[in-house]
Amino acid sequence: MAVASVAALLARGPSGTVLATAAGALALGLVGFLDDRLSLPATPRLAAQVAVPTASIVSLCLFCSTLNIRGIALSAILIAWCAGYTNAFNFMDGANGVSAAQAVVGGVAIAELAERAGADPSLKAASYALAGSAAGFAFHNLRGRIFLGDVGSYFLGYWLAALGALAVANGVPIESVGPIFMLYIADTTITLGRRWRSGERLLEPHREHAYQRLLTAGWTHTQVAIAVAATIAISSAISVQLYEQGPIARTVGLAAAAVLALGFVSVATRLEARSFER
């Protein structure tokens, strides 16, 4: 997927900003490849997930004429967002088709929002390149023939996070971008919150996410992937439809996406509990 996405993007002649995003995604993909082969500890993996967006943002800032407190604060937020979402994406990659669903639906939604905002055409091309490669991967992943591994999840997670940030930088309101990522944000936040309260290590592998609870409840990987894809698709469709309706309507759409994501997590938790009772 990494090779296909970048090759498709290069064929369209991307802007420098989007090219830097692709370079960062490839760099983290390489870290994931090393982790797949060598089982890297959590600390160096997290360090790389912070270092890559930091290097990308610093390289972009070299072309800025001014640097102020606001710019530094925004840079810190972007670094935290890219590192955090890359980790969230990696945590959520534990059922066939789930990560592909986020990449396909998310990529198409970002491309549509970029089109409506009149953003850099390279952003739209990069989003479709990612969605297309993920769709091709999903065909085989749902059959259990190939899997992402850390190389794939790091690559996809970082690219999606960076594309969302670029969309906001290109004029897409953050309340329009938020619904695309809401399910992953809600599921990961709730799961890590539970683990933190229990005194467990946050960055270690676990099986407490909503999609994992559905698997425990007896759902198949395909059923879980369909449920995840439908949830993300509904949230994204609401966001795209309300894009031109003003900030109040977009905020309502963001809230609706949050409620939908929380409902997904809640239902999964209850279904798992019922399976234990039986």
Image (cartoon, grey):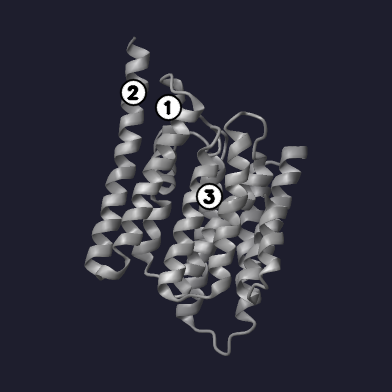
- Looking at numbered disc 2 in the image, what kind of residue is underneath it? Leu
Residue lying at the far bottom of the rendered structure: 65
Residue 104's place in the image compared with 147, above or below, is below
Residue lying at the far top of the rendered structure: 278
Q: Position of residue 51 (x, y in %)?
A: 65, 61
N-terminal-most mark, 2 or 3: 3
Residue 53's place in the image compared with 207, above or below, is below
Q: Which is in the foreground here, disc 1 or disc 3?
A: 3
State the CA–CA distance, disc 2 to disc 1: 8 Å
Q: Which residue is mark 3?
A: 103
In front: 191, or 164?
164
In front: 224, or 90?
224
The disc label shown at residue 271, or none? 2
Q: Residues within 10 Å of mark 1 (few under 14, many from 20)?
A: many
- Looking at numbered disc 1 in the image, what kind of residue is underneath it? Arg
Tell me the element at label 3: helix
Residue 189's place in the image compared with 110, above or below, is above
